[in-house]
Image: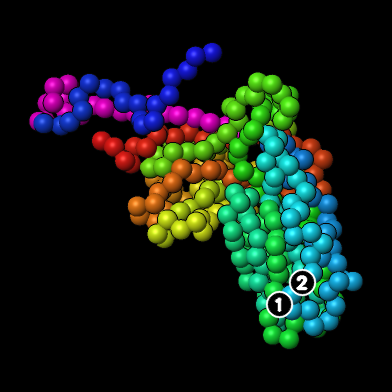
Amino acid sequence: MARTNFSGPINVGRIQNTTGTSINENVRNVAFVECHASFPVNHSNFTVTTDADKLAVTGSNGASTTSVTLVDATQNVPGITSDGGFEAASVITLTSAGNDSARTATITGTDVLDNAQTEDLTMANADVATSTKTFKTVTSIAIDGSGTAGTLSVGVIETGLISVVCRSLFNEYPLGQSSTSSSKNLANNIVIPKFSRINDIRFVVNEAFDTAGFDMQIGANVAQAAGATLNSLDLDYFAGDADNDVKAVASHHIPTGMDQTVAQMKNCLNVSDDDAAGFEMDKAVVISAKTDDALTAGEGVLNIYWTQQVNDTN
C-alpha cells in the first residue's frame, strides 16, 4: 500500500500569520494534524522468576569481595524478549550474607535502550538490596572499602521493575509475525520526533492483569550535555509512578487514570524539554512496570497521540 511521509508537522488553515484583528481575514487560523502510534503488551513481557543468583553466585563471591565475579557479563538480565524482538531490562538484587550496610556497590551496565549506565547502590545487612535503575546487561559490580562481610549473590526478582522499549522488528501481535517473516510490518513502534507535543497517553487494558497491583511508568531517552554519547533513560519522563496501578480493564489515560505530575506534563508539551540545548533527539518510548504477584494473564495497548514538531515551527 502506498504511503506519504512528512518530516515536519501538517498544517491546516489558510491564514498563517496574524496581521490584524479581523477574524476570517487576518487572524491566524492554522492548526496541526495529530499523529498516533501504539504498542501492544501482555503479561509475559513483565514476567520474571525470582532467581537470587542468576547474575552472580555465592560460590564465586565470598567474604571481602570487591569485584563481583559475574556468571555471564553479556547475558540479558531478565531473560525477556518482548513482542517484536527487543530484549527487556529489569532491576537487579544484591543479597548479602553479612552486614554490608556500610558498603556501596557500583553497578555498571546498559539500559533497555543500550545506553551505558551506572548506579551506586547501598547494600544490605544480611538482606536484599534492589537497584532503582533497570538493567539490560550488567558488565561489572564493584564494592567499595574492604568489600563484603560475607558471601554475595546477584539476581532478579519477580516483583521488580521491568522496562520494555516500544519498538518492534516485526508485528508479532496481531499479525503473528516473527524474525523469519518475509515481509515484516513495523506498525508496533512508538518513536516521537523531537520538539513534538504529546496530547494524550492511554493504556487500554482489554484483559485484566491478575495481580494485586500492576504499576506503570512511561519514559524515554534524554540527550545529555554537549550531545555526549552518554544519553540516559528517564523511566517516568512522560507519565506514571511507582503507585500508578493500571491492572484493571479500562482506558487508563493522563492525568488521572495514568498519573502525571506538572513536570511530566511539561515534558509532554515539548518532548525535548529535558534534552541538552542544541542536542535534542527523537524519543524512544519505554514502558516500565512492576507487579505485586506472579502474572499469568493480562493484555493492553499503549496509545500515544502527538502533534509533530510543533515546538520547532510556526
Question: Given the image, on which type of amino acid does mark 1 rest?
Answer: Ile
User: Label 2: how many residues lie within 10 Å, few (<14), some (14-19) or many (20+)?
Assistant: many
Q: Residue at x 65, y 20 (%)?
A: 183
Residue range (magenta): 20-40
Residue 244 visible, this angle: no
Classify residue 31 as left or right of residue 290: left
Residue 214: x and y, percent?
A: 70, 47
Q: How is the image coloured?
A: rainbow
Please tell me whether mark 1 sits on a helix, a strand or a loop: strand
Q: Residue at x 17, y 31 (%)?
A: 17
Residue 68: give its label.
2
Residue 300: give its label.
none
Residue 242: x and y, percent?
A: 63, 55
**Residue hosting label 1:** 143
Q: Which residue is drawn at 58% across and 54% down?
A: 115
Position of the N terminus by quadrant: top right
Please tell me whether mark 2 sits on a helix, a strand or a loop: loop
Residue 43 visible, this angle: yes
Q: Nearer the viewer, residue 174 or 252?
A: 174
Q: Nearer the viewer, residue 313 or 260?
A: 313
Residue 226: x and y, percent?
A: 40, 59
Mark 1 and mark 2 in contact? Answer it, CB < 8 Å.
Answer: yes
Classify residue 158 as left or right of residue 189: right
Q: Quick check: 38 above or below 161? A: above
Position of the C terminus by quadrant: top left
Question: Outermost residue toward the bottom?
Answer: 146
